Amino acid sequence: MLGNRLLHYAKTDYVYYFIVYLILAMVIFYPITLHMNSTVPGSGGDTYQSLWGIWWVSYSTFVLHTSLWHTSLLYYPIGANLVYETFSPLLAILSAPFQSISIPFAYDLMFFFGFAISGIGMYVLAKYLIKNSYAAFFAGLVFSFSAAHVAQSYAHIQWMAIGFVPLSLYFLLTMMDEGNAHRMRSSFWLGLSFVFASFMGGIEEGIMIIVVILMAIVYYLVIKERRALVISRKFVKYSVFALIVAFALGSWGFIPILHVVANPSQSSTVNQYTLSQSSLWSDNILSFFVPSYYNGIFNNGNANFMYGIYETDPTEQVAFVGYAALILALYGLYKERRNRAAIAFAFAAIFFVWLAMGPYLKIGATITSIPGIYVLYHALPGFNVFREPGRFDMIAMMFVGLLAAYGIMHLYELKQLKSDRTKRIAAVAILSFIFLIGSVGMPLNKAFLPLISTHVHASQFYADIGKISGNFSILALPALPNPNSVYPALYPGLATYDTVLSHKPIVEGYITRSNETEIISMENIPLIVQASNLQTTGSPSYPSPIIENYTNETIMSLFNYNTDFITLDTSAYNGTVLPELEHYLGDTFGSPIYSGNSTIAYATKSAIQSRIYNSYVGYPFLPEWAETTYPINGTDQSIWVPFYLSASEPPRILVYAPYPNGTNVTAAINSPVRQYINTDINITAMSLSHSVQNISVYTLTSSNSYLKIASFNVTPHMQAYTIPVKFVSGPIGNPLFLVGNYGSNGEMPVAITGISFNKAN
């Protein structure tokens, strides 16, 4: 029976138009089609992490047989929680058979498939509502090939296949249709569509469906004649069944999501942006009326194209509707002005456009004080997973497409088209061509290609590393995003993708929902911060309240992170600072073991064995220390203000003390006998209030209870203080806690310019 049904659908226009949308995508994006084994859509770190994502899902599922929601390959040794990662697990599974050809080939297939499924999903909805195949085809074209969808698809795998949003609305409407004899079947497909949207797309797409469904229900409640369809036992029954289907078929993903929602400290950050930050990623009102940054005809390789409108990130801020679609939509709305459904589509389009414009209206380079409804949306728990408001454009285009379909339908009523099928097809073809040229365009020269595509090449070094047995990690520099770059996360993203070749963990990584712990794990290695600052400011500085030998701190961290190799991507640095970084790495780790293309690699074991535990190393818990400037003796100086995370969590420092003699390090590490060293803690501090502040220093006993080891009064004048203590040498570590007055925001009213440690006489 199922086979007969599938055969029936295979003979319908759904398959025909699916193929048409697929061919259109392959023609429009021909630079990718011609190089599917090596070139992928998009540019920057997001592209590389998406490539890594489809590989990781299949690798963890079919090779490791472990959960795909956590990986130890990134941010080693703590790993990364991937529950909110945008790697589209169902799309990744679909790509698995093609990954044996190459990861880029499999990714490109999913890219083209995404446009086809988006178009056909919209076609199904539009045909049901408009009852005209040509009009429905154009609606699918508007939705799938909208400038916003193309821009998002270039770098975000989760936005490639968005066809399950209109499909979900279609199944909701047929579920509520009393004339439909298969309402329970529609309920099942609604639940399944939600699962596909959430995991072939992303959890944000699932939230989009929830918003659209709520709007549809409100519409039915408002319309008196349809109110009974919602306020009924059958609707409740079908809705509950859809929820059961969705949860049963998507439990493998929904349960981990619910777990991290209930335990936010264990998850990656859901919404990293404040309202003011979201404003930077919102649509500019002008962006709805000017061609896309990624339009190959109007931009054609000009990096400064409409820079004031697309200043933050063109991927998130492209919103061009397309004048062909807009005119047809307005014409359709005019002709259907007495149709309450058409009026509802117009209001829905306006609603999502309003959301896309973010917290405050932006006009040109000005962010006004005019608030948008995103301010309210942002406050909804769970829904604020949308950090970039501009993504709502794609849903707005769904309703624009429906209105444009009405416009096409009424064009066919014109006398010269009404009775001539050839002319009707030609009219749709011409309008489609005009829309595609305005919305997408086609790249006309090579200068445009870097804006829309990335040439992916295999790293020989990482391929060679993959042949080495054993468990060790790699540190790739630069490891932190460069905020001054057009593609800030390019190099962390590239390092993430290189694990596809090496199968070895890296200290850094790039995922779209990182958390504070992952960032701190990197910043505990001074070399990472110094290399980043050298890249961005030209100075290898390492801001820390502790003054010590930062090279030894780096070596200590590399030892703890089991890091055997450091790689340097020379293309990330200019010719002025690169020699300085190479010289430092050579002095610290010896001559490179590999040099090829833009990669230089160093082995770390020799340096670690010769220098570990030879000096004091202190790790401040960075969230509890805020760097600022303060006028001291008429000069602004850098100071550190310690903070409590909570009233019961005073600022911490973990100190490793050197061995007091030339004891063999390996033997000492393995020895159960503790060695102690008399140490002076040197603190230069001043009270920021007008009164003397008492500071106590605590440590932990073997039973994890607090033990006060010192107390001193900090005056309103910068002054040095020395605190004699006894530290455990070697790998045990000595936790210190600074306890003082707890300010209104957790800050201690003292300033510290430097903390150091030295052997006591």
Image: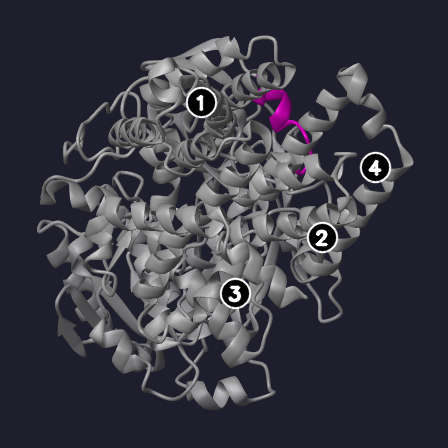
Of tags 2 and 4, the one toward the viewer is: 4
Of tags 2 and 1, the one toward the viewer is: 1
Measuring from the top left, give residue 246's x and y in whole percent.
71, 52
Return the residue at label 3.
79
Toward the front, the furthest residue is 419
Mark 3 and mark 1 lie on one chain; the one further toward the N terminus is 3
Measuring from the top left, give residue 556's x and y in whole percent.
41, 70
Return the residue at label 4.
235
Q: Is residue 309 visible?
A: yes
Residue 381 magenta-drawn?
yes
Mark 4 and mark 3 lie on one chain; the one further toward the N terminus is 3
Mark 4 and mark 1 lie on one chain; the one further toward the N terminus is 4
Measuring from the top left, give residue 53's x and y in whole percent.
44, 61
- Looking at the rendered structure, the secondary structure element under dot 4 is helix
Q: Is residue 616 visible?
A: no
Tag shown at residue 404: 1
Type of amino acid under label 4: Phe
Residues at badges 2 and 4 in contact (C-beta under 8 Å)?
no
Type of amino acid under label 1: Ala
Q: Nearer the viewer, residue 341 or 50?
A: 341
Q: Nearer the viewer, residue 176 or 715?
A: 176
Look at the picture and state if 524 lies above or below 187.
below
Residue 299 magenta-drawn?
no
Return the residue at label 2.
246
Type of amino acid under label 2: Ala
The magenta stretch is 373-382
Look at the picture and state if 63 lies above or below 239.
below
Toward the right, the furthest residue is 233
- Looking at the rendered structure, the secondary structure element under dot 1 is helix
- Classify residue 748 by image quadrant: top right
Q: Residue at x 55, y 55 (%)?
A: 9
